Amino acid sequence: MELITVPTQPIEGQKPGTSGLRKKTRVFMGPHYLENYVQSIFDGIGGVVGKSLVIGGDGRYFNDRAIQVILRMAAGNGAAKAIVGRDGILSTPAASHLIRSRGTDGGLILSASHNPGGPEADFGLKYNTPNGGPAPESVTDRIYARTQEIDSYRILESQDVDLSADGMTPLGGLQVEVVDPVASYAELMAELFDFEAIRALFATGFTMRFDAMHAVTGPYALEILEKRLGAASGTVMNGTPLPDFGGGHPDPNPVWAKDLMELMMGPDAPDFGAASDGDGDRNMIVGRGLYVSPSDSLALIAAQAHLAPGYSKGLAGVARSMPTSGAVDRVAAARGLSCHATPTGWKFFGTLLDAGHATLCGEESAGTGSDHVREKDGLWAVLMWLNILAVKEISVAELMEAHWHEFGRNYYSRHDYEDVPAERAAALMDGLRQRLTTLPGQVFEGLTVKQAEQFDYEDPVDGSLAKNQGLVITFDGGSRAVFRLSGTGTEGATLRVYLERLETNSDSLLLDAQIALAPVIGAADEIAEISRWTGRSGPDVIT
Ligand code: G1P
Ligand code: ZN
């Protein structure tokens, strides 16, 4: 084994977004690309001499090769310890939990989340800090700065480490500890939720389907749902992780989890349906005949979390990303809880969770979680729902209807325009930004603009500023349209339009969301000139 220093030079476009660096797999596989980025992470966090790191990923194509490179580089840079999930597998929430429970100096998570996997698809890498959460901008800025000036990286020349069996292996001065990716996460879930009540629910014949989408949650769901909680065998669908996720988008929404949705809307629907994404941090919740939007799921959990043992003392506060619907705000107001609206991206919840300002957080993009880790957590949300259903003994649809009657319903939808030429998307946003001050008082599709502003966020804990996090148009009566560009895409620009309308009339709580939102959708198109700039007559994806 020999420690070598490889001369290199900066590679363009290594700027991490809201979820680390995401690129085409081939780009990551290119000469020095991964190595440059890993060295920049190490340098950006002040070196890794004597440090310990958790390392694991969602099992997508190149996961196994990339982990071997990272281990050799950790050894080459003097790290003391690497805790690695067996076969290189760790779901994002399980990695966050390991970083926290083992008290490491952070971790490296290999994933492009819900993006497809494979040699022609996407790959990603992010650094999480010792609190278990995604690195804040101050850290990713330092990492990016290093990518701009890097001139060499350090790596140990050696054979691959065997990651197929638990235990310790030395790699130069680095101790590699291979651990069961599921065990300690499953223990944490058993502490937070009433497993006995959920087991009893399944014992009464309650039926469920969990779609692991051929991604990382397969082994977690099999162990927890089928083995520990006694759900019928076959409850977990697509439970074997595959490097290309079976060719699909491992994104748990009605579009990509189509088979599950069809089942849930059909005559043979089980009582409960759920799915999780590539790296296990997102979730979808469906009842028999009813899809629960992530914003509604967050609100429902806020109202009912006290039914789970880990939350029986109540919540310190709640937080949502700004584009997420105001449904949770209504629960918070009724219960006297503080409620925060943050920019998109889980990292903004970290300071609030660390400071004890919030217990529960959520995003409209199928992310829900709590202070048990510092990432959103797909299976956690599913278990929370199961715990609530086990105590309430009513159906998902009955539960949601009762919720809307009590708090009102925030009809909600997100329209995505994908792969828009970057200059056109930027022109749309810039044009709208310049017109913001002229909008209040104007009427579009019968809706009068009350307020139009750019969302800038000052973190209430550390005072850091995040500017220009979306454009928000509020209408009289509480409807809203929010515009922002995606920070996670790997091709062109994705325009996201978030649409919302509050309804408190108890006769109008069960409308189709697109119909209920029609005026807001029309107004948003007119205000931002969406068809003109995108050249499209409608969105590519509606969720
Ligand atoms: C998307 C979601 C956002 C989420 C992020 C990472 O980011 O909208 O809520 O935190 O993925 O999963 P976007 O592509 O919108 O920047
Ligand atoms: Zn994810």
Image (tube, rainbow, N blue to C red):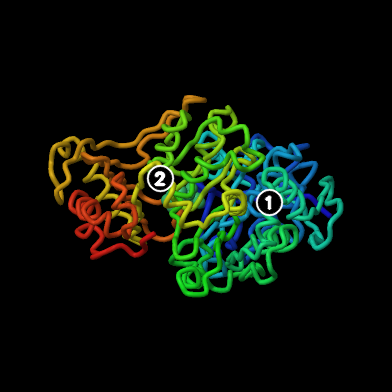
In this view, the residue in front, 186 or 157, is 186
Mark 1 vs mark 2: give the one in front: 1
Residue at 58% over, 28% down: 356
Tell me which label, 1 or 2, sits earlier in the chain: 1
Q: Nearer the viewer, residue 140 or 331?
A: 331
Question: Where's ligand 2: which quadrant?
Answer: bottom right
Q: In the rendered structure, which amino acid carries the disc numbered 1?
A: Ala
Q: Is residue 37 visible?
A: no
Task: Please identify the quadrant where the N terminus is shown.
Answer: bottom right
Q: Is mark 2 within 8 Å of ligand 1?
A: no
Residues 61 and 195: in front is 195
Spot occupied by residue 359 in the image (x, y as percentages of width and height): 56, 35
**Looking at the picture, does residue 527 appear above or below residue 68?**
above
- Compared with 465, 248 (above or below) is below
Residue drawn 60% across and 60% down?
31
Query: Percent x, y for residue 314?
Result: 58, 33
The residue to which callout 2 is attached is 324
The residue under label 1 is 197
391 to the left or right of 334? right
Which amino acid does the dot numbered 2 rest on?
Answer: Thr
| Secondary structure found at label 1 | helix
Position of the C terminus by quadrant:
bottom left
